[in-house]
Image (cartoon, rainbow, N blue to C red):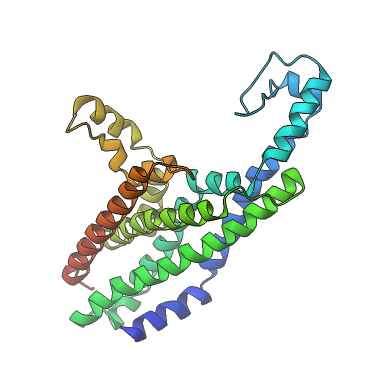
Amino acid sequence: MFNIIKMDLYKMFKSKTFYIMSIILIILILSFAILIKTTLSLNYDMAKEANFIYSVGDNTLNPSVQSPEEYYAIQKEIKSSVTVDDFIMIQYASSIMLIVMAAFIAKFVCSEWDTGFVKNIIPLNGSRVSLVVSKNIIVLLFVLIEGIISIFVAMGSNVLVSGKVSILDFKGIIIYIGLQILLQMAFASLMILISYLFRSKSVTISIGILLGMNVHAMILNQLDKLINIANIEISNLSIINNIRILEFSSEPEIYKRVIIISTAYFLLYNILSLFRVKRVEVN
């Protein structure tokens, strides 16, 4: 097992995909900051023409703001109120990190089948179990590295928009990121399973994009309307939905639900991956 883990570690850090995905993540996250910076830097006439007149507090559109003085005062207040917390939540609540991770997993896992390298390690029954364990360790390392990158990029984004690094709740950030890592690992285990099922990078990436964008939410919402089991909403059992609705100040019940759901899905998908890998034929 340790040899397979060591091999995968070497392969990850030597892979261009790892660095390309990291760069893409940084660029996409910074694009949010640039968009916010650009919007908040519009002069009064341009903002009014684009209907980008903001109200204080919830940053919603407020066409009732009429004077330039009032607009610039609100604009300044919004800029100063932006924090690192906001950018971290934007990163995780969007589809960016999930899609980047799906692309990395598709390339990392499926390339073994494309090149035929899997023939060197999969014939041994014990190695098949080690293969799944190793992939989870590598993906966890990837998620942790991307999480660290996201924190530094969030700080840079904060400086870009408001000229300073402002953190409202450092402890809350740590708890929030920790819970998000659990959910991302549950999502990653699903992507690993899909990679083993289809052994196709294009199929895995396509499914990852669709899931990351939460396109299945409409189906889940309709099921919620049709099915009512002990007042439990099916949409609340979705990994993606929990990633999107999780907040820094969520209720303890939501934290418990996230831990239970992420753990259950992680175990389920990995068990299915083990069954798949043990039974797959190597041509």
- Looking at the figure, which quarter contains the C terminus? bottom left
Which image quarter: residue 109? bottom left
Residue 87 picture location, percent across and down: 60, 46
State whether residue 81 is above or below residue 140. Answer: above
Quadrant for the N terminus in the image: bottom left
* Rendered image quadrant of residue 150: bottom right
- Point 28% across, 63% down: residue: 196
Q: 257 or 6, which lies in front?
A: 257
The image quarter containing residue 198 is bottom left
Position of residue 67 in the picture relative to residue 118 (left or right): right
Residue 210 x %, y %: 39, 43
Task: Give the left or right position of residue 152, taking residue 255 as reference.
Answer: right
For the image shown, how many numbered marks are present on the structure? 0
Above or below, comparing residue 38 to residue 23 in the picture: above
Q: Residue at x 45, y 52 (%)?
A: 98
Foreground residue among 52 and 230: 230
Q: Residue at x 73, y 38 (%)?
A: 79
Q: Nearer the viewer, residue 170 or 30?
A: 170
Image check: 127 left or right of 218?
A: left
Q: Nearer the viewer, residue 113 or 127?
A: 127
Kindly identify the residue that appears in the image at 43 percent across and 64 percent down: 107
Residue 217 picture location, percent across and down: 34, 35
Res 145 visible = yes
Residue 138 location, x and y as percent? 41, 71
Residue positioned most to the right: 69
Q: Does residue 35 sit above or below 96 in this rendering?
A: above
* One can see residue 45 in this view: no
